Amino acid sequence: MSAEATHETAPVLEVRGLRKSFGDRCVLDGVDLVVPAGSITAVLGPSGCGKTTLLRIVAGFEHPDAGTVTVRGVRVAGEGTDVPPERRRVGVVPQEGALFPHLDVRRNVGFGLPRGAASTERIRACLELVGLADRADARPDQLSGGQQQRVALARALAPNPSLVVLDEPFSALDTALRAKVRDEVVGALRAAGATAVFVTHDQEEALSTADRVGVLLNGRVAQCGEPIELYRAPASIEVARFLGEAVVLPGELDRDVVRCALGAVVPGAVPPGASSGSFLTVVVRPEQIVPSADGVGATAGETTYFGHDGLVRLHLDDGTEVDARWAPPLLPRPGDRVGVRVVGEVAVYAAPGPGR
Amino acid sequence: MSHRPSARAAAAVFALLAAALAACGGSSSSESNSASATASTIDDTAATPTGTITVYSGRTEKLVKPVIDRFTAATGVTVELRAGDSGALAAQILTEGKASPADVFFSQDAGALGAVADAGLLRTLPAKGLLDVVDPAYRATDGTWVGTSGRVRVLVVNPTLAPNPPKTIDDLLAPAWKGRLGYAPTNASWQSFVTALRVLRGEEGAKTWLTAFAAQQPKAYEKNGAVRDAVDKGEIAIGLVNHYYLYEKIAAGGAAKVVAKNVYLAPGDPGGLVNVAGAAVLASSDNAVAAQAFVRFLLNEESQSYFATTTFEYPLRTGVPQASDLPTLASLRPPKIDLADLESIEKTQELLASVGLLTK
Amino acid sequence: MTTAVATGSRARRRRVELPPWQLLGPTVVVALVALAPIWYLVDQALDRGWGPAIEEVAQRRTVDLVVRSTALAGFVTLATVLVGAAAAWIVARSDLPGRRVLRVAFAMPLAVPSYLSAFAWVSWDPSIAGFWGAALVLVATSYPYVYLPVVAALGRIDPAQEEIARSLGWGEGRIAVGLTLRQARPAVLAGALLVAQYAYMDFGAVATMRYEAFTWVVYGAYRAGFNPTRAALLSVVLVAVSIVLVTAEGIARGRVDASRVGGGAARRGRPVRLGRATGPAAVFVVVVLGVALAFPVVSVVSWSLWRGGEAVAFGEVFSALWATVGVSAIAALVTAVAALPVGLLASRYRGWIARRLEQATYVAHTLPGVVLAISMVYVGVRLLRPVYQELPVLALAYVVAFLPLLVGSVRAAIEAVPERLEDIARSLGTSRSGAWWRVTLPAARPGIAAGTALVFLATMKELPITLLLRPTGTETLATRLWGHTTLSDYSAAAPFALTLLVVAAVPTALLSGLLLVRGREDGGHVG
């Protein structure tokens, strides 16, 4: 649970109605985002969706066409105001660290600080926070990618910014290293009590790391909330599809259940105005489809292994194809007959209209 | 922080600077080229020369330094020497115009002096003791410059290869000499000779001679010294050079070792051109007394003998003898030409280029 | 290799907005100074009015001269691109033994003044004079202008590309020409522009080889014709040529993204094995270094052996050395200061004003030294009389002459520093200009230092400007050398020539060494 401490209820960052176009390409189309103090918020979206642009506007390197940005209650962008980056107190950690090549680690971290004993102490503290106090005299080209990222974070934190924005901070690292560095970075952020926003296209990263996730689709924040909320109750089919595997089926409301190819499923929330007989769209997660002796009949197809589980394609008797995620001991061979049912609540949406 | 003010301010700066330059530029161009009257003569013998003078010298430092040192010892005047190429120095003086820091222009050839005189930048020199110690043929008609030493164009000849050397430049065109002549195409004295040819025989006449000379397939050398050495070694029979090159070689190695001989051309022949090195005082000089004293010093007997014995040139002060082996100037009867007409070598260069005697 | 892809809107984020006041002001001042010769030329060319001016220029002879000079410049540019690029490839990508020595050796011909080299050649064999002699000397003395930037660029290329090309079936040769060198195109173009301008404006080689090119005729108009108007008119034609060259290079460069490729480690690629090509490569090396370096040096040494018993005037040599080094150092520093705002503007800002200002500093580069000298005499006498023929005007003239060399280096060095670093510095509280001062310029230091060394070198060898504008009584190694050779006193000239070559070798080595460091600096860490 994020540290929405009682002494700091005002949000650190408020973005309202942000619009930005490059030429005739509209990148941001009315983005709203609120970042509470002390939280780590992820902005999740596919590549090229404008999340980097959003970050740059917040940091002050781009000017929005419309909308406002407010940091700690002070308007910094929009409606006539344009506070330059050097006065916004927004720290930046870019995709590849981007340490100043001509300075050693200590001077990199101390770049935003005035000279003096207090600064020396602060530098040391920040380096300790990221676990690199012993590399203070190294030069950037002597450090690994992960180490450079951590120094970049220490550098951004040193002047005690209101907000730290990170641009796909872990995507430049090898997979093996990624999780470790991520944990270290998040740990440092929390230990510092910093408020952070990071953008990523990696859902696993966003969902596992952040306190709140905003999904940026088509230039807008489609949904913003806690990860589990987003996963279980995505606000729209696009969000559902984006946030993990989704099995989308047509269904019909029948009092308090929805009937679909996978049998009767329990909806989490019924769209307003729907009544028995309404056509709905059902979204089921693959891990919700479990083997069941008296479930819907299906023939197993190919399985894709992921090590810790596998995704098996099932051909239901009525012709529908769905993917189910099962642990390895349960995975069938192609051609096996299985019965399946759905556990847990599913998300339902109004059907877009006849003849989909 | 909007950007509009920057644009306006930048435009203002542009406009200001452009205006400033236009104002400065407009007034300057007419200065240097008008041939206004030269400053009136002053009598430098009345006053004692003091202070400092700047000498632009087209003659090398090695040659001029001893004279300068003696001048300074005799008068106490400090001399700042700026050595360079006579033509380039003249161009510099012309560009500097009235603001030139030069007091004296000591040139290797008369053409450069003439060019500066034409621009009205020289002071008329006093006749008494200065101009009148030199034959009128070797000084400016308006008294703005005076020759200090002379050189004669000769044929340097290998006696074995050319027992009966030609005496006129037209004789050089005889078939017997095909492929056996040498010259230095970029040499200023050779180009002065060709300029004199243009003056004496007209453009057409000069072109005719040059075309025929080119048909003789003369060998080209970098410098006159190389021509002389080639004649001495027997590579070529005849070379067109200045008279003193032979004597330089003799002085260096001894007469016994030198085979080549100088042949002086017939009286009045263009090939026997006498050109002079000379000096002038700038009208804008702020120390004209000392400057004139320096020119006077160049013409005194000691300096004149120095030129005669060091470089084997002809001293131009009447009464000072040339080096012992040389025939007297009077006996040579060089072609009559106003040295000021030798000013524009550029047209000569174009002519030479067009007949293939200059560039490749 | 992940982040080689630059996201679309960020790929070329040079601002189209107007540069800030603090940058625009100094750049405008520098550009105006660089245009001073143009001011003089136009003034002088129109001295007698438009009518005679047009008549003078519109002659058959002018066209002939343009053709002759262009033929020479064209051939020399082509040849230097081939020689320079080949030399760079051999040093950076092949496995020829002795590459480390060659890396510096190939740059050494920069230390040899063109008049010295031409003189050595024509003394040995006078028949070499003419087009081919001039071309030989010009190629020999100027190919390093292509070699140096290309070898630096090759050091930054991602070797993964070559490996991929090989997996797609490309042969080594095709890769070398079609891929590797192609990537270095901006460097080649920048070097080619400098060479082309040099070929148009060099006087020493052309005059010694008696090839009737523009510079010789212009020089003749000054010192033989005393016709500065004609000289100015011809020079204006040269300026027009220069504008064409600069525009062409700008267009050619504009199509290629000059920024660094690859955001991560630029590891060293495996050298290409030459195999049977080792023989020809070795021959190439010997021929190039022999012609460009060994021959002039040996000639000069042999001159000193003619001396016999005559004592060397050590005092003169030393004072000339002192003057040369002092003046060159000052010139290099002042030029560097002048080039910084221009280079910064050119690399960080797009837009009409920024491009024109940068090009303004290049325009006067085709002018022969004598023209620059005379124009600075003109400007100096009229605007700066108190310091005329003193160090300030001399230094100013060098700045005008050599600014293009430094602006190019500064621009390239700054372009290699990602703008992102400036953004981050701003996020840490520094203003934009503060970020340039604290981050961009220090990060670009090696490239800037290399450019400064180049100007230092060029000033040491320089002749016509020095002759006309030096303080009376001051002699440099070059002016002394020239003074003695005009008298054919080679043995007296030799000590000055030798000293000049030895001293010039120092900044040349520094130059190539700095580029060596640069090649390594960009890639250090591993994944």
Image: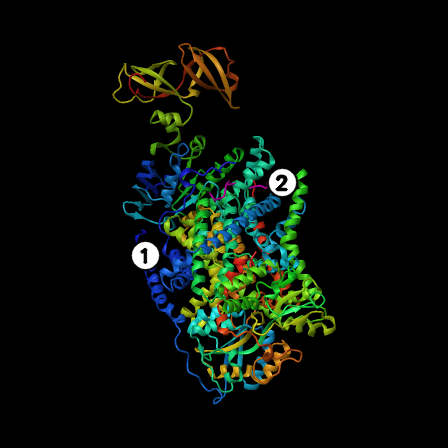
Q: Name the residue under label 1.
A: B11
Q: Residues within 10 Å of mark 1 (few under 14, many from 20)?
A: few
The image quadrant of residue A245 is top left
User: Which residue is the extreme one toward the right?
Assistant: B256
Q: Which residue is at the front of the view, B11 or B237?
A: B237
- Where residue B154 sits in the image (x, y, percent)? 62, 71
Up/down of A269 relative to B119, above or below:
above
Check the picture and name the quadrant holding the C terminus of chain C: top right
The image quadrant of residue C232 is bottom left
- Where residue C317 sits in the image (x, y, percent)? 62, 69
Q: Mark 2 points at which residue?
A: C271
Up/down of B339 relative to C451, above or below:
below
Q: What stretch of residues is rendered in magenta?
A: C257-273
C127 in magenta: no
Q: Which residue is at the front of the view, B66 or C320?
A: B66
Q: Please, what is the three-letter code of the amino acid marked with disc 1?
A: Ala
Q: In this view, does B210 lie to the left or right of A49?
A: right
Q: Which residue is at 41% across, 32% downward?
A: A46
C272 in magenta: yes
